[in-house]
Amino acid sequence: METIDSIQEQRQHFYDKINPANLTPLWEVLHDVITKEPKTPCLPYLWKWSQVRQWLLEAGGIISAQEAERRVLVLENPGLRGQTRITHSLYAGMQLILPGEVAPAHRHTQSALRFIMQGQGAYTAVDGEKVTMGVGDFVITPSWTFHDHGNTSSEPMIWLDGLDVPIVELLDAQFMEGAQELSQQTHTSAAVNFAKFGNTMKPVNYQPKSKTSPMFWYPYERTRQALEELKQHSELHPCWGHKLQYTNPATGGWAMPSIATFMQLLPAGFNGQSYRSTDSTVYAIVEGAGRCCVGDMVLEFGPKDVFVCPSWMPYRLEADSDTVLFSYSDRPVQQALDLWREHMG
Ligand code: 1HN
């Protein structure tokens, strides 16, 4: 009769035999790979603005934007250290440009968003169009478009970068190149772009060049006005308050093909119900203060703090004063693959 030990031995012998041929038995790993629910290494965490800002300005004293190419402190998830990412699928970093500096022009297949945290008047040039950025503005750098940044103002400029770096890495579709010139010659300003696409209209002969929104500058003032209007006259959602998604005005779909972006308002005293979704989400506070109760953690937030909620972990939002939150996630990718789920309560 075969004993359990001898069966194990026989199996191990078999595994050892097939191993050099790069074969492995699925049944030994099946339930580690196909889990009942999302099993993310991503952990909840909050980065305090005062601390990040201080260290970023300190970095400004030890390396120039030009030498660094991009002077950025990566917000690395504590569960994903060494992997240059804030969630399993998305990157986040805080970038500093000092007065007079330029970050040289380059392009890559990774898509980027900028969300402005501090300063007014620095610019980013995207494919020859110049965007002057202010606090709360959301700016897009589509895949494979040349972009450079410069600060012609007298104040340091800091913004949050969000990129789909880990998604592009997973797909082994990374390409990057520098431009001939340090800074691009700009031929038009984002105000023209906004006139074309920012008023629920579009040029009559518009032909999309890519899946990314042709409007790549979403000024805060307009978004804030819309949220204020909703606060006065619209019903509050029990989980997310008043929440809008940024859209591609030509399609009504997401502004970026790989990253969903949102802005929401939680009125003072908001005590949100529990919510979870499969898209791990990065939040940046624009105005106000409150807390996010996520898993067994309470993340107390104030203006310009950044925090992350992992996939499928229930969380609740509370606001002490009127609070405006920008957020981004990989929801468009999950929806394109019919994977996205949410659950309330
Ligand atoms: C990048 O190009 C920028 O253009 C910022 O400002 C952060 C992180 C990874 C890869 C490329 C930028 C980046 C990046």
Image (spheres, rainbow, N blue to C red):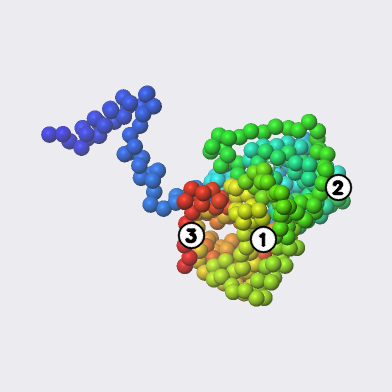
- On residue 342, the disc is 3
Left or right for 264, reference 343: right
Q: Percent x, y for residue 320?
A: 64, 71
Question: Label 1: how many residues lie within 10 Å, few (<14), some (14-19) or many (20+)?
Answer: many
Q: Does the Cβ of the disc 3 residue fall within 8 Å of ligand 1?
A: no
SS at badge 2:
loop
Q: Percent x, y for residue 274?
A: 50, 66
Alpha carbons under labels 3 and 1: distance apart: 22 Å
Q: Report the quarter where the N terminus lies.
A: top left
Residue depicted at x 67% and y 38%: 144
Residue position for label 2: 152
Q: Does the Cβ of the disc 2 residue fall within 8 Å of ligand 1?
A: no
Residue position for label 1: 285
Question: Where on the image, by quarter, is ligand 1?
Answer: top right
Q: Percent x, y for residue 22?
A: 39, 27
Q: Nearer the viewer, residue 95 or 295?
A: 95
Residue depicted at x 36% and y 27%: 19
Q: Quadrant of residue 221?
A: bottom right
User: Is 105 situated above or below 251?
Assistant: above
Residue depicted at x 35% and y 32%: 24
Mark 3 or 1 closer to N-term?
1
Left or right for 340, reference 92: left
Mark 2 or 3 closer to N-term?
2
Q: Percent x, y for residue 198?
A: 73, 57
Question: Is there CB contact under 8 Å for labels 3 and 1?
Answer: no
The amino acid type found where label 1 is placed reads Ile
Mark 1 or 2 closer to N-term?
2
